[in-house]
C-alpha cells in the first residue's frame, strides 16, 4: 500500500501516474438514490475505474429507501454518470464492466432487519465478485441519519472487520449540526470503528488547488519568511456561489451557510493558509498543525459578532441575466425563513505569527460569480517611489484561485516601459488550464481513492471538526435569536454591510 508520504511526494512532484490501486473492495453507498451519489460519487468512482485506478473486482452496493432492482440502479447510474461527465467521457465498454459491479438493495436506515439482510447480501456479492471482505461504508444520507446508521452498523456487527478484510467508514459533511451533536457522533463512531478507519469527508480538501496550498507555502522558500504579521496586512477567503439551494431547501433550512460551508470547507482552507509549518507531511503532522492554529483563533464574543461579522439572505434578483426567486420563495423553504445564505466572519489568530492580522472569510449562495479564492494582501512598500511615479500601484498581493480557473497570481510593482520611471502593478500568473495536465481531477476522485488506499491526510480529524464547531457556535447561537432578513439581491456580491465593514478597516474585497 502507498504510504502517506509517497502520496504527498507525488502531489509535490505534480505527478499522479504512480497512484496505487487499492485492494479489491466493496463500497456500501448509503443514499445511493440521492443527489450526491448520482452527481459526484458514482461518476467519480467510474472515472477512477475507467482510468485503471480501481481493481476489476471493484464493487458498489447502493442502499436507500427507493425500491428498485440492480438493473434499474445500473441504468439510473449510467444516466447520472453521463450527465455528470458528458457522454464523450463515458466509454461504453468500460461502463459495461463497471456496471456489472453495481448492486442495489432497498434499506431503511432505522430497520434492524434491513442491516441483517445487508450483511447477507454483502456475503453473497463478495463470493460472486471474488473480492475479499474489504468494506467501505459511505454515508451519503442526510446528516440527521448519520448517528443512526453508525449505531446500526455497530449493533448489527457489520462495522467489525471480517477475518479477510478491513472495514472503514466515510462520513459526509456536515459532521453534526452543532458541537454537541458532532461530539455524540464522534463518540458513536469510535465505539464501533478505530479512529484510523474513520474518514470524515470534506471534499474541499480534495480540490487540486487546496492541496496546492501546502506545496505553495512549504515547497517555496520565498513565501515562508514573508508569511506573517510583519509583511501581511490581511487575508481574504471567499467561497462564492451563484447557485441557490437547488432543490435542497429542506436541508438548507436546518443548515444555513455557516453549517453548510463555513464550519467545514472555509475553515479547512483557512487553516491551511494560517497554520505553522507541519513537522512533516505525514497525515497526523498536517492535521496537528491545522488544529493548533484553530486553537489560537480568537473566540467570537457578542461584541465581536456585532462589530466584525455580517450575515445575509438573498432576495430575488438576476443571475447571468435570468430572473431568480429569493430564498424565501425556494421550494421547501418557509416564506418567513430567517436562515442565512451569506455569512462573513472576521477571524483573528492570537499567536505571534498573526497578531493584528484580520482574516476575512465569506461564503454565500446566489452571489454574482462562482469564485473560491484566497487573497493574501501584503503591506505597503516603503514608498521610495513617490506619487508622481506611481501609476495604478497597489501593495503586493498573492491571489490563489481555487475554482474555477485554478491559478496563482502574484501582483508585483514593475517599471512601465518607456523613458520615464513610472511604476505600475503587473500580475505574474500560473494558470492551471494552460498546463499540459488539463483540467484538475474531481475532488471526490482523489478522496474516494485515498479512503480505499487507507490514506487519511485529506480527511478531517475529530478534534478539527470539534474545534471548528466550537468557533462557530457563538455565532450560530447569536444569529438564531433573530432571523436573517433578505438583504442582498441574487446576483450581487452580498450585503452592502460586508463591504462597509472592510471599508471601515481601510480594506476592500478583492475584485468587487
Ligand atoms: N448534494 C450535494 O451537493 C452535497 C451533499 N453533501 C452531503 O451528502 C449527504 C447526502 O446529500 P444529498 O445527496 O444531497 O441528499 P439527498 O436528499 O439527495 O439524498 C438523500 C438520500 O438518503 C436516502 N434516505 C433518506 N432517508 C432514508 C432512510 N430512512 N433510509 C435509507 N435511506 C434514506 C434517500 O433515499 P430515497 O431517495 O430513496 O428516499 C437518498 O438516497 C448529506 O449529508 C449532504 O450534506 C455534501 C456535499 C455536497
Ligand atoms: O458541501 C457543499 O458544497 C457545495 C459547493 O461545492 P463546490 O465543490 O461546488 O464548490 C455547496 O453548493 C453545497 O451547498 C454544500 O453542501
Image (spheres, rainbow, N blue to C red):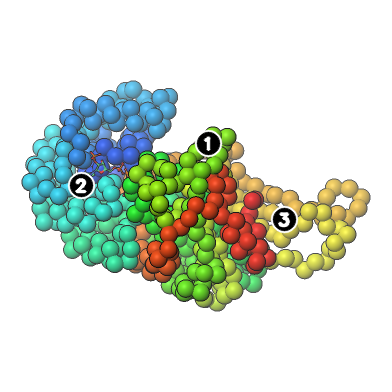
Instruction: Single out the mark in the foreground, 1 or 2.
Output: 1
Residue 447 position within the rendered picture, expressed as x and y whole percent measured from the top left: 36, 48
Counting other residues with Cα less than 10 Å from the Cα at mark 1, is it few (<14), some (14-19), or many (20 or more)? few
Residue 336 position within the rendered picture, expressed as x and y whole percent measured from the top left: 40, 52
Distance between mark 3 and mark 2 Cα atoms: 51 Å
Q: Which residue is mark 3?
A: 412
Q: Which residue is mark 2?
A: 135
- Name, please, the residue furthest toward the right: 419
SS class of the residue under badge 1? Answer: strand
Counting other residues with Cα less than 10 Å from the Cα at mark 3, is it few (<14), some (14-19), or many (20 or more)? some
How many dots with numbers? 3
SS class of the residue under badge 3? Answer: strand
Say the numbered circle drawn on residue 415.
Answer: none
Residue 224 position within the rendered picture, expressed as x and y whole percent measured from the top left: 58, 65
Q: Which comes sooner in the sequence, label 3 or label 2? A: 2
Q: Which comes sooner in the sequence, label 3 or label 1? A: 1
Q: Which residue is mark 1?
A: 323
Amino acid at each position: 500500500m502507498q504510504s502517506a508520504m509517497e502520496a504527498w511526494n507525488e502531489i509535490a512532484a505534480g505527478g499522479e501516474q504512480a497512484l496505487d490501486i487499492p485492494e479489491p473492495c466493496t463500497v456500501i453507498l448509503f443514499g445511493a438514490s440521492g443527489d450526491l451519489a448520482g452527481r459526484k460519487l458514482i461518476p467519480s468512482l467510474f472515472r477512477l475505474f475507467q482510468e485503471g485506478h480501481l481493481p476489476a473486482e471493484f464493487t458498489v452496493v447502493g442502499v436507500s429507501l427507493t425500491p428498485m432492482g440492480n438493473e434499474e440502479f445500473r441504468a439510473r447510474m449510467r444516466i447520472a454518470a453521463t450527465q455528470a461527465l458528458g457522454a464523450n467521457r463515458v466509454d461504453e465498454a468500460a461502463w459495461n464492466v463497471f456496471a456489472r459491479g453495481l448492486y442495489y438493495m432497498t434499506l431503511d436506515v432505522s430497520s434492524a432487519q434491513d442491516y441483517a439482510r445487508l450483511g447477507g447480501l454483502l456475503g453473497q456479492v463478495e463470493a460472486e465478485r471474488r473480492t475479499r471482505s474489504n468494506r467501505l461504508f459511505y454515508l451519503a444520507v442526510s446528516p440527521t441519519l448519520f448517528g443512526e446508521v453508525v449505531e446500526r452498523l455497530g449493533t448489527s456487527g457489520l462495522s467489525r472487520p471480517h477475518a479477510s478484510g478491513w472495514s472503514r467508514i466515510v462520513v459526509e459533511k456536515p459532521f453534526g449540526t452543532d458541537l454537541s451533536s458532532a461530539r455524540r457522533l464522534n463518540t458513536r463512531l469510535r465505539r464501533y470503528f478505530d479512529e484510523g478507519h474513520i474518514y470524515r469527508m470534506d471534499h474541499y480538501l480534495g480540490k487540486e488547488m487546496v492541496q496546492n496550498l501546502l506545496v505553495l507555502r512549504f515547497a517555496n522558500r520565498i513565501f515562508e519568511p514573508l508569511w506573517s504579521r510583519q509583511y501581511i496586512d490581511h487575508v481574504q477567503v471567499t467561497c462564492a456561489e451563484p447557485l441557490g439551494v437547488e432543490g435542497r431547501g429542506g436541508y438548507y433550512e436546518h443548515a444555513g451557510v455557516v453549517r453548510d460551508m463555513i464550519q467545514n470547507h472555509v475553515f479547512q482552507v483557512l487553516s491551511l493558509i494560517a497554520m505553522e509549518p507541519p513537522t512533516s507531511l505525514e497525515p497526523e503532522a498536517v492535521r496537528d498543525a491545522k488544529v493548533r492554529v484553530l486553537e489560537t483563533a480568537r473566540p467570537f464574543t457578542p461584541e465581536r459578532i456585532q462589530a466584525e461579522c455580517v450575515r445575509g439572505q438573498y432576495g430575488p434578483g438576476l443571475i447571468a441575466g435570468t430572473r431568480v426567486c429569493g430564498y424565501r420563495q425556494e421550494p421547501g423553504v418557509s416564506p418567513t425563513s430567517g436562515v442565512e445564505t451569506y455569512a462573513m466572519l472576521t477571524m483573528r489568530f492570537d499567536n505571534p505569527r498573526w497578531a493584528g492580522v484580520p482574516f476575512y472569510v465569506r461564503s454565500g449562495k446566489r452571489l454574482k460569480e462562482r469564485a473560491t479564492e484566497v487573497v493574501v494582501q501584503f503591506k505597503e512598500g516603503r514608498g521610495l517611489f513617490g506619487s508622481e511615479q506611481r501609476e495604478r500601484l497597489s501593495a503586493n498581493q498573492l491571489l490563489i484561485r481555487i475554482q474555477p480557473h485554478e491559478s496563482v497570481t502574484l501582483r508585483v510593482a514593475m517599471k512601465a516601459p518607456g523613458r520615464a520611471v513610472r511604476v505600475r502593478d503587473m500580475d505574474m500568473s500560473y494558470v492551471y488550464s494552460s498546463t499540459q495536465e488539463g483540467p484538475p481531477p474531481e475532488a471526490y476522485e482523489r478522496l474516494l481513492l485515498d479512503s480505499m488506499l487507507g490514506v487519511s491526510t485529506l480527511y478531517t480529524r475529530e478534534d478539527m471538526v470539534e474545534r471548528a464547531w466550537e468557533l462557530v457556535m457563538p455565532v450560530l447561537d447569536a444569529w438564531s435569536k433573530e432571523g436573517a432578513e433578505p438583504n442582498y439581491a441574487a446576483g450581487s456580491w452580498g450585503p452592502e454591510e460586508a463591504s462597509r465593514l472592510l471599508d471601515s478597516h481601510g480594506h476592500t474585497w478583492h475584485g468587487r
